Amino acid sequence: MSNIVRDSDVVELDAPPTFIYGQKVKSRRTIRNDGTYAGREIGDVLAKKGEIGYVVSIGTFLQQFYIYGVEFLDSGNRVGMKRKELEPAETREDIDIPLPE
């Protein structure tokens, strides 16, 4: 079994999630299958950099990070992503739902 490497000492769960259900987001990088996406080969592209999707679930990982389930429109894939892998696709002024501070 491989060792799990934590990204930082920051515990995101001490604050509310950055993104909310239904929020339109954009992938900040290309995401490839690391072997945890069933039915796809390791290394297959799951989401391209700049691809637009919507947050459909919010979970946690290692009691440290929020994991956002994002349904991407172009690929049709639902991918679990960390905050640092996403950015809002719209500003506060573009939408009617309140975003976290």
Image (cartoon, rainbow, N blue to C red):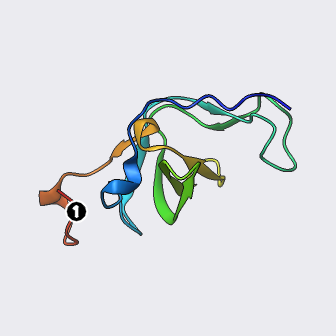
In the image, what residue occupies the spot 44% across and 30% down? 8
Q: Secondary structure at mark 1?
A: loop
Q: Is residue 7 visible?
A: yes
Q: Which residue is mark 1?
A: 99
Badge 1 crowding class, 10 Å Cα cut-off, few under 14, some 14 to 19, many 20 or more, is some
Give the amino acid type for the residue marked by disc 1 in the picture: Leu
Which residue is at the front of the view, 51 or 86?
Answer: 86
| Residue at the farthest left position | 93
| Relative image position of residue 40 (x, y in whole percent) | 84, 42
Which residue is at the front of the view, 48 or 4?
Answer: 4
| Relative image position of residue 60 (x, y in whole percent) | 54, 57
Horizontal side, residue 100 vs residue 31: left or right: left
Name above or below for residue 4 compared with residue 88: above
In the image, what residue occupies the spot 46% across and 59% down? 54
- Asked where in the image residue 83 lies, by quadrant, the reply is top left
- Asked where in the image residue 50 lies, by quadrant, the reply is top left
Q: Is residue 72 visible?
A: no
| Relative image position of residue 7 (x, y in whole percent) | 50, 29
Horizontal side, residue 78 vs residue 39: left or right: left
In the image, what residue occupies the spot 75% across and 34% down? 34
Q: Pick the quarter of the image with the N terminus.
A: top right
| Relative image position of residue 33 (x, y in whole percent) | 74, 36
Horizontal side, residue 90 vs residue 27: left or right: left
Q: Pick the quarter of the image with the C terminus.
A: bottom left
Name above or below for residue 64 compared with residue 33: below
In the image, what residue occupies the spot 25% across and 52% down? 90
